[in-house]
Amino acid sequence: MNLPGAQDREKARWVVGRSLTLDILLRRNPHYENAARINVLSEKRHIRCYVSASAVTDIYYVAKKELKDNGIVLQLLKNLLKTTHIASVTETGIHEALELEWDDFEDSVQYVAGQSISAEYIINRNPNDFSNSQIEVLSPEEFLNHITI
């Protein structure tokens, strides 16, 4: 898989899952290394990563529960959102996600958010959960093994 040329990089949109984002924020092993490598690609603007708006509150909740410090969690989120964009979740999007009737509702919301930004790929630790996706879904490992810059 090749990334688009420099002139097209802003068009290359990747939706990252909530777990991948938490792996970065909380340095969760064994997933942290790959998540951090993807985050660096976003920081360097080689890719444009998005997380669904509905996932941000979940990320905050899980991070605060683990770190037990509101100030640190807010700062971590602010830092992350300097390089990770937010894909809106609308009322219509929630209804569309419900109509998909996938086993994991969070995945269906992530998918619909990806559609709303014309995402080319979704990066998720469980690509098999997206078997009905019309957007290609890659695990972090698959993404990193196939990407060239």
Image (cartoon, helix red, strand yellow):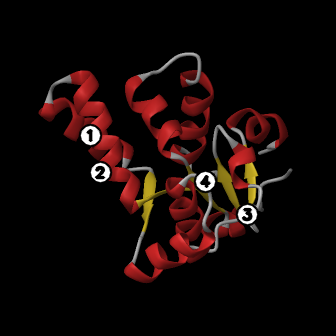
Residue at numbered disc 2? 57
Q: Which of 40 and 52 is in front in this view?
A: 52
Q: What residue type is labelled 1?
A: Tyr
- Residues marked 4 and 3 touching at CB (< 8 Å): no
Q: Compared with residue 112, is residue 130 higher up or lower down, i.e. above or below?
A: above
Q: What SS does tag 3 mark?
A: loop
Q: How far apart are marks 4 and 3 (CA)?
A: 13 Å
Q: Compared with residue 15, is residue 65 higher up or lower down, i.e. above or below?
A: above
Q: What residue type is labelled 3?
A: Ser
Q: Residue at coordinates 39% horizontally, 77% vertically from top-left?
A: 90
- Asked if residue 77 lies left or right of residue 19, the reply is left
- Residues marked 1 and 2 touching at CB (< 8 Å): yes
Q: Which amino acid does label 4 sit on?
A: Asp
- Asked if residue 95 lies left or right of residue 79, the reply is right
Q: Quadrant of residue 141?
A: top right
The nearer-to-camera label among 4 and 1 is 4
Q: What SS does tag 4 mark?
A: loop
Residue 133 badge? 3
Residue at numbered disc 1? 61
Residue at numbered disc 4? 103
Q: Which of 114 and 146 is in front in this view?
A: 114
Q: Quick one: label 4 or label 1, which is nearer the N terminus?
A: 1
Q: Residue at coordinates 68% horizontally, 37% vertically from top-left?
A: 140
Q: Compared with residue 9, is residue 17 higher up or lower down, i.e. above or below?
A: above
- Residues marked 3 and 1 touching at CB (< 8 Å): no
Q: How far apart are marks 2 and 4 (CA)?
A: 21 Å
Q: What SS does tag 2 mark?
A: helix
